[in-house]
Image (tube, rainbow, N blue to C red):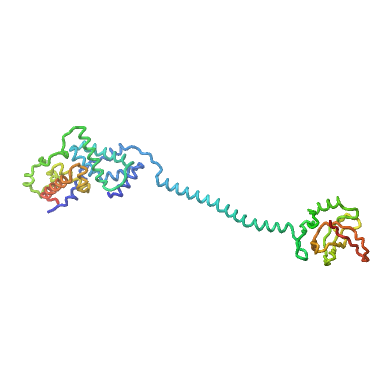
């Protein structure tokens, strides 16, 4: 009869063993329980992810806004530049003078830049001859007469000349012609003009003033 | 206890988990105690060394690196601790240098004459020489290879296999296989 040596041997060994656990436990050194490496790793991983999310939340909107500003500024500048001044094209297509948004009439051919309306008025007043006066008018009608000039019908908004009252309509004749490079003032345009009375023999009932060009 | 389970217990012991040590204690107390007892041949000394072994295992958990053969590793530590105790007390016991021709506790002639089927395992083991019991114990309880046993006992491989075969022959005569 064979007996299982291994099984019985193991049983024999384990039954003849003293109980030493209490003695062993009493002699164990207390170990401090540090934070587990897994927790440290998890903490570092989550901290890294959180930092990445914060950086992305800060950088992405900034970059997006910078790109939008850069794309829109170019066209805006072009629009603003276009709005600030209008190059008036003469009848022959040449652009030599500009009517600004504040109504100043600029004739570069004469070599004088009148600048703003106020500046024009002040300068004109300083150099104006006694029969010259400045008016602020709104152009109501433009009648371009080729090779003879332009006849404007204008409403007076303000005038230095007591004979030319506000809210009255006057005729203004510009003897310069488009062929000379003078640009016509546009209809409904408001501007300050230096005028003088027309001394020519005119049988018409309306008083016509002449636009002074310097 | 499987290798992974043992490594997991050692890992828990790093952080002061005494229950992990208790699990190892329950699994291997008989194994370690027998190894130590076979070396010191004294119950009181065996209890002392076995207790110190598990206390040392508790400290070794801090630097333990898992691998293969935790049983052989523990057996080597326990046996060395028992041998160190013998050196301190200067007791004369059976060692690796002990001659294989030395007679055991019971003359072999009496084993042949006894009614072998009535022998208990303990009695059958008593017929073995101390160094043979040591090899049998490490082989059965430690589940080690002969090379591992040779490394622990610091004897040649051939000596280990010879002792084991001799022990098995005697036990087989007693009805144990």
Which residue is rendered at x = 59% and y = 55% of the image?
A67
A57 or A84, which is in the foreground? A84
Q: Quadrant of residue A23?
A: top left
| Rendering coords of residue A179 (x, y %) | 80, 64
Residue A103 appears in the picture as rendered: no
Q: Quadrant of residue B79?
A: top left
Count numbered badges in the picture. 0
B91 or A114, which is in the foreground? A114
Residue A96 appears in the picture as rendered: yes
Quadrant assignment for the N terminus of chain A: bottom left
Left or right: A5 in relation to A185: left
| Rendering coords of residue A211 (x, y %) | 86, 59
Left or right: A61 in relation to A116: left
Left or right: A98 in relation to B103: right
| Rendering coords of residue B9 (x, y %) | 32, 46
| Placement of B169 over or under A204, stated as above or below | above
Which residue is rendered at x = 29% and y = 47% of the image?
B67
Q: Quadrant of residue B94?
A: top left
Quadrant assignment for the C terminus of chain A: bottom right
| Rendering coords of residue B36 (x, y %) | 21, 40
């Amino acid at each position: 009869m064979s007996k299982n040596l291994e099984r019985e041997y193991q049983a024999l060994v384990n039954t003849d063993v003293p109980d030493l656990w209490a003695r062993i436990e009493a002699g164990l050194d207390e170990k401090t329980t540090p934070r587990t490496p897994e927790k440290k790793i998890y903490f570092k991983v989550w901290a890294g992810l959180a930092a990445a999310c914060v950086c992305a939340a800060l950088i992405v909107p900034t970059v997006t806004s910078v790109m939008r500003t850069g794309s829109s500024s170019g066209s805006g500048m072009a629009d603003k530049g276009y709005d600030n001044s209008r190059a008036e094209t003469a009848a022959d297509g040449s652009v030599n003078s500009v009517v600004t948004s504040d109504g100043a009439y600029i004739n570069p051919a004469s070599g004088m830049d009148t600048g703003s309306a106020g500046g024009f008025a002040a300068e004109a007043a300083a150099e104006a001859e006694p029969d010259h006066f400045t008016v602020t008018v709104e152009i109501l009608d433009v009648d371009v007469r080729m090779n003879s000039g332009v006849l404007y019908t204008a409403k007076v908004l303000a005038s230095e000349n007591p004979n030319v009252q506000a809210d009255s309509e006057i005729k203004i004749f510009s003897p310069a012609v488009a062929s000379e490079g003078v640009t016509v003032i546009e209809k409904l345009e408001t501007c300050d003009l230096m005028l003088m009375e027309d001394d020519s023999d005119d049988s018409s009932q309306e008083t016509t003033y002449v636009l002074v060009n310097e | 206890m499987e290798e992974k389970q043992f490594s997991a217990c050692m890992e828990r012991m790093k952080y002061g988990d005494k229950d992990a040590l208790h699990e190892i204690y329950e699994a291997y107390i008989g194994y370690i105690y027998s190894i130590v007892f076979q070396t010191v041949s004294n119950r009181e000394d065996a209890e002392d060394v076995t207790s110190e072994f598990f206390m040392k295992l508790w400290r070794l958990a801090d630097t333990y690196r898992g691998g293969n053969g935790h049983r052989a590793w523990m057996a080597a530590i326990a046996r060395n601790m028992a041998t160190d105790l013998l050196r301190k007390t200067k007791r004369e016991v059976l060692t690796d240098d002990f001659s294989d021709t030395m007679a055991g506790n019971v003359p072999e002639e009496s084993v042949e004459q006894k009614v072998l089927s009535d022998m208990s395992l303990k009695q059958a083991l008593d017929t073995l020489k101390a160094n043979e019991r040591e090899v049998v114990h490490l082989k059965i309880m430690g589940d080690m290879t002969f090379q591992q046993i040779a490394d622990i006992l610091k004897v040649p491989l051939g000596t280990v296999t010879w002792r084991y075969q001799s022990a098995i022959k005697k036990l087989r005569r007693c009805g144990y296989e």
